Amino acid sequence: MDEKSTSSHQRLLLFLLMVAVFGVFMIQYACPSSSECQMLHQLGAWFTLGGGPGIRIGESQDGLQKDPYIAEDGALARFVPRFNFTSADLNREVDFNIKGDDVIVFLHIQKTGGTTFGRHLVRNIQLERPCECHAGQKKCTCLRPGKKETWLFSRFSTGWSCGLHADWTELTHCVPSRMDSREAQKNQPSRNYYYITILRDPVSRYLSEWRHVQRGATWKASLHVCDGRSPTLSELPSCYPGDDWSGCSLQEFMDCPYNLANNRQTRMLADLSLVGCYNVSAMGEDERWAVLLDSAKRNLKGMAFFGLTEYQRKTQYLFERTFNLQFIAPFTQLNGTRASSVEVPSETQQRIRQLNRWDVELYEYARDLFLQRFQVARQQERRQARERRQQERRRLRGRFSAKQGRRPRPTETTRSTEERRAEDSLESEVLLSDWWDVDENSTMEDYIGNVEQW
């Protein structure tokens, strides 16, 4: 009876083990992306043949931490640059002096995730003097340490001081005079203005704006000032006769030839004075947009920083490295927005791309520049980490040799416990890979729902 019982228990254990192994394979099949089924993948990692027990998510078999961007994204893709940029274009670290007179200016383009990014700027940065934000108030007070001066020009700090969603043309002419009037001082030194912005995939951004307009948004308060004046009604006709365009269909939205949603990112980043502002009769349409696109690319490349809505973690990383500022909480990328939930036929998507063909070209350029900057920054970080390890090893070897009264080359048997522990600590730093992830997520994602509110 005992032998039968033992045999039954063995068969039961074998059956349970087979079920567990089968379950692991099913997890990998049903949820190939670890971001979608993170807890299940973490459980499965203990049984995966390639990892084995005792190896945690984000670690390699030798116990060293992997590149967090690769471990977090869970994708292995190579990015092949298409555009040639100079070293100065790719090395984007500025000497931002928050205690001096430097100012960060946020150019907020509609439906790019700018509302959430703007909240990060006033609520989520580690500062000696944090911004003061109070419940029920739309604006925060962001002052320099020891001064009653602001270091941030944005919607959530100074408000729409240059007009609702002011563009490049408006901000570059308006911000200096506004800052001088706010902080009227004699012998004021010349300020450094660091312009930043966020871009988004043109099709997703366009659909998001349509849904927003469908709910009653108008942005009628926008001034569109160029060369000292706002456009006339004939220069900038309205797409609708009433107070708003609520309830409009996507077809109606696409059919309006004056719709400012078309190629909005290119127009808002370009110097409109180069094409006669909103006077479209100054030159042919294709020539006009070619000039605007070239201007937008030039201005974008010259900005201190820009991010992409589709790459939240990389956006955070590049901002922190550019300005030497750290965010308190990491940026989050959640699946799905109102725009991404819209079922749009492929033919309609193609028409949207055609309507926004200048934005499509600008975004491809921006994405290439963004990922090349990320590449350079990560390579520099890896090199700096390697140099720190080498310096620490030389220091420890010198100390060990001094204790022994000679300078032999240390071996595994002669190195002190202190030296080995220090090297182990250095090796446990994040190892940066020669490759990095491009497709951070398979679909366009905004990361906080209220991004659709503005």
Image (cartoon, rainbow, N blue to C red):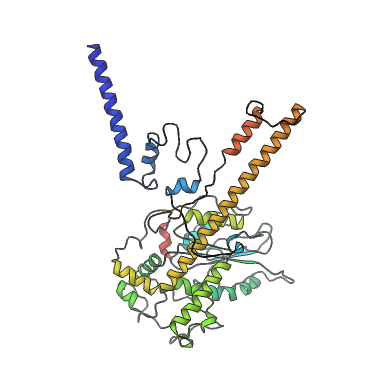
Left or right of 419: which side holds 372?
left
Count of marks placed on residues: 0
Which residue is nearer to you in this view: 387 or 28?
387
> How far from the left and from the top, in percent, is residue 319?
56, 57
| Residue beneath the point at 29% across and 35% down | 22
> How far from the left and from the top, in percent, is residue 95?
66, 59
| Residue beneath the point at 52% across and 49% down | 434
Q: Quadrant of residue 5?
A: top left
Check the picture and name the quadrant holding the N terminus: top left
Residue placed furthest toward the top? 1
Q: Compared with residue 134, is residue 418 higher up or lower down, i.e. above or below?
A: above
Check the picture and name the quadrant holding the C terminus: bottom left
Which residue is nearer to you in this view: 122 or 224?
224
Q: Quadrant of residue 189?
A: bottom right
Left or right of 174: which side holds 220?
left
Which residue is nearer to you in this view: 362 or 435?
435
Q: Quadrant of residue 94?
A: bottom right
Which residue is nearer to you in this view: 110 or 367?
367
| Residue beneath the point at 56% across and 67% down | 301
Q: Compared with residue 172, is residue 128 higher up or lower down, i.e. above or below?
A: above
> How far from the left and from the top, in percent, is residue 132?
57, 57
Residue placed furthest toward the front? 409
Residue 77 shows up from this direction: yes
Left or right of 193: which side holds 270?
left
> How far from the left and from the top, in percent, is residue 418?
66, 30
Q: Compared with residue 324, is residue 277 higher up or lower down, i.e. above or below?
A: below
Residue 223 shows up from this direction: no
